[in-house]
Amino acid sequence: MKNSVAITGMGVVSPIGSSIADFAKAVRNGDSGISYLQELEEKNFVCRVAGIPKPIQHNDLIDKFLPEYGDKAIRYALSACIDAWQDAGFEIPDMLSNATDDRLSVVVGSTCAGYDYFARMKSLIDEGRTKRLGSWFVVNTMHSGPAAFISGLLSASRMTESVSSACASGTEAIARAYDLVSNGVADVVVTGGCDPDSPYVWAGFDAMRLLCRNGNDNPQSASRPMCEKASGFVPSAGAGILVIENMEHARSRGSKIYAEIVGACVNSGGQRNGGSMTSPNSQKAVECIRNAVKMAEINPAEISYINGHLTGTMADPLEVANWCRVLNLKNDFPYINSTKSLIGHALGAAGAIETIATVLQMHQGFVHVSKNCMPLHPEIAKIYDSAKIPQQTIENVSIEYSAKASFGFGDVNACLVLKKYR
């Protein structure tokens, strides 16, 4: 029999708040974190708007592990981790102690961790001054950096893993963490995702014409998931970190419990049947969601809220059609929204930040506005009840089960099913 899995702590760094309290308030208010970025204009981007994270906390503690000039993704992850760990009721270990925690694992996802630091240090290599790179260069540019630094911060010694599955990275990391706890491999796992804000991360997407092309004059209306006027996604950055643990372990220490994870699935479309390096194989995306729901041992009709991957690109109508197919939606529709409408697309951090937004809505009983979604894309309007796509925050909503899915380049899929804790 598998263990029940509880979410007991959360921390976030995002364009609308870098504490859970600030983030929750902004999500509920439907605040936008998108702004004009002069640096993107100077670098001749077509898209010149982005979601830049609010200043992080805990700099004094983070500086003991990572210099102030360290990689942004790692610093974001550490800040969110400290909040999540303390939110779960744990204390940060003494960094001078040799004690390790053999039941604690770390699983963190990222798409581009290390890019920011590498870009800032590249000139030293080009100028032949490699000796000036110092001993921090490798650990700041290796993709496993965020997980490794968190492991050191918390003295985690069961397992330390890094996940990189493009925009599915954060959600896949949580799914992997769920497997570790549900199968009894670890009692507690610190998990989530992070990515840096940098033109060197976003330039390729701008070149592919995937970034928003007509929002520069009105940044807060630029991110338009599910909208007929959407012209690409708005890039952003940050980190979302969760503490998940064996339910009995959480109860035995009297921890508060935000929600349960009751199902998770990760798969790949194999870049067949319409899938490619940049497009999903719908059949496998549907199977991913279906298998997560099956693992949760519920009827698909019990899903009352969906936090979609929904980015503001031409993939949105296909995603909504896939949700309709897998949940057999015809007359009774669950609420669906896109947290990216508020914060933009944080790449490898997106799934984790959006999972936190999902948990907050379940825990506090509301559904946040899906900002700038009107007029709906006509293909979505044909198949989905527009009343279930919130145009303002809806209060006093009881969400018993929710689904959070992410889809990434490489034709990869990840889905979580969450249950309200009672």
Image (cartoon, rainbow, N blue to C red):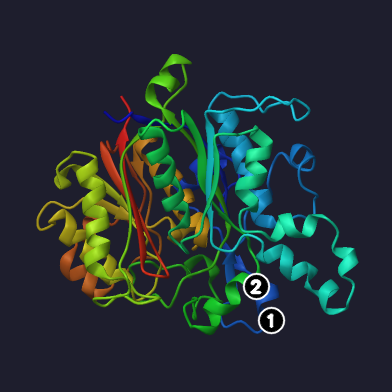
Q: CA distance from mark 1 to mark 2?
A: 8 Å
Viewport quadrant of the C terminus = top left
Give the percent coordinates (x, y) of residue 177: 44, 41
Based on the displayed image, in which of its 4 quarters is residue 49 positioned? bottom right
Q: Is residue 60 visible?
A: yes
Secondary structure category for the residue under label 1: loop
In the image, what residue occupies the spot 16% across and 66% down?
Answer: 383
Q: Which residue is mark 2?
A: 199
Viewport quadrant of the N terminus = top left
Q: Amino acid at mark 2?
A: Pro
| Dots 1, 2 in contact, CB < 8 A | yes
Q: How many marks?
A: 2
Q: Looking at the image, tell me whether mark 1 or mark 2 is earlier in sequence order.
A: 1
**Figure check: 193 above or below 275:** above
Give the percent coordinates (x, y) of residue 90: 59, 24
Q: Which residue is mark 1?
A: 43
**Figure check: 42 above or below 315:** below
Q: Amino acid at mark 1?
A: Lys
